[in-house]
Image: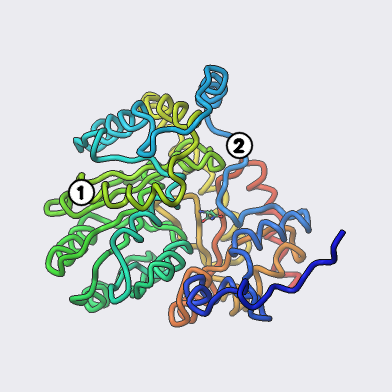
Amino acid sequence: MHPPRELSPSLAPAPWQRAALGANLLAPDGSLGVTIFEEMTGLALRTGAINLGQGFPDEDGPLEIREAARAAISAGANQYAPGKGLPQLREAVAAHQERFYGLTINPDTEVIVTTGATEGIAAALLAFAGPGDEVLTFEPFYDSYGAVIGLAGATHVTAPLLAPDFQPDMAALEAAFSERTRVVLLNNPHNPTGAVFPRSVLQRVVDLARKHGSIIITDEVYEHLTFGVSHLPVACLPGAAERTITISSAGKTFSLTGWKIGWLSGPAELVAAARTVKQFLTYSSGTPFQAAIAAGLALPDAFYTGIAADLEHKRNILRQGLAAAGFDVFSPQGTYFINVDTAPLGIEDSVDLARRLPALVGVAAIPVPVFCHPEGAARTRSLLRFAFCKRTEVLEEAAERLATLSGRL
Ligand code: GLN
């Protein structure tokens, strides 16, 4: 065995890589660290805490979809899929968009399969944004957005979402647009806040994007996880379709986050540009999983309404537990995340609390400031995100543990 070697300077991250990956990924010694999700999942595993941090379900998705993947493997679907995805999955995505939203897309030219939504986001951003361009997102924002905007060499501009309902400040949104706004990157329903944006907000974004000649990339991975409101794809709004790339993923809808099958759709020339990038990121995505997800997308409407109703019930259990523990709770209309303000318990710094929470009460969560730039992090300093995509008995146990927090601080 050779002793581990120091990284040579040429292997250390370059300054631009550090900037791209963000302060959240830098360890105190300046070396690259892991994402907050990995850090908190690692901490939960080491301490045996209930993991309400990283968003993944603790029950696997429908048996028939898992069996379809097994059958596809047995039938020999084990070599590269076509770069743009298996025809049956592209057709299933087109049928899904028609069934739920009345959107007609050509499965041959207007949809590609990606390795999770993560790759779809990266391919679309790298295709359209570069140095000198601005990419506008709401803030807080999902962590990969900041990283990929940085990797593209573009400038990340944000417009704040404000508690308690996490809707945008419309004047700030308008002011955040400029003649350099190349892409507006939306996320609806929104991670980490759980906000669902109403038609009026989405239409305003579309109108501003048209005025400034911006492309819209919309991440709608939580499209089927809404409570009491229906999902409205941006691409359905007047003036949006010709400039919008819509991204989704099987991970959330089917509780199969480890399969990493996603897709993007939109006008043929926009999709072709994203596809050009995708072919050099992964070339193609897991063949047997694509076949199985094609079958999954054909599940009846009752499946889709069932997952939302089940999650709403889970949200209610955790919401009640968090309120009983003394937090101010912001009730989400979508996603499987719920945010709380820790200030009523006298806690000002949620990053510090998240690092101590597993040892204090045996529950892990994600601090909201890690989804922000410094100014937004100051605004969200006492906010903490909990995931509720867990079995009800796990949520009840977590609530009981959290009820002891105020006595342990
Ligand atoms: N989307 C998941 C979350 O927000 C995490 C996925 C990841 O670890 N990158 O918790």
For this rendering, which residue is in front, 287 or 141?
A: 287
Is 128 placed above or below 278 here? below
Q: Which amino acid does label 2 sit on?
A: Glu
Mark before the other along the chain sequence, 1 or 2 = 2
SS of the residue under disc 2: loop
Residue at (30, 32) in percent of width and height: 96
Residue at (32, 59) in percent of width and height: 186
* Residue at which label 2 appears: 59
Tag of residue 297: none
For this rendering, which residue is in front, 214 or 230?
A: 214
Is 83 placed above or below 303 here? below
Query: Do the residues under discs 1 and 2 have CB atoms within 8 angstroms?
Result: no
**In the displayed structure image, the side of residue 315 where residue 30 appears, left or right:** right
Specify the quadrant of the image occupied by residue 203: bottom left
Q: What residue type is labelled 1?
A: Glu
Residue at (43, 27) in percent of width and height: 296
Number of numbered callouts drawn: 2
For this rendering, which residue is in front, 30 or 144?
A: 30
For this rendering, which residue is in front, 151 or 289?
A: 151
Task: Tell me, yes or no, if residue 10 can be seen here.
Answer: yes
Q: Quadrant of the C terminus?
A: bottom right
* Residue at which label 1 appears: 269
Residue 22 locus on image (x, y percent): 51, 74
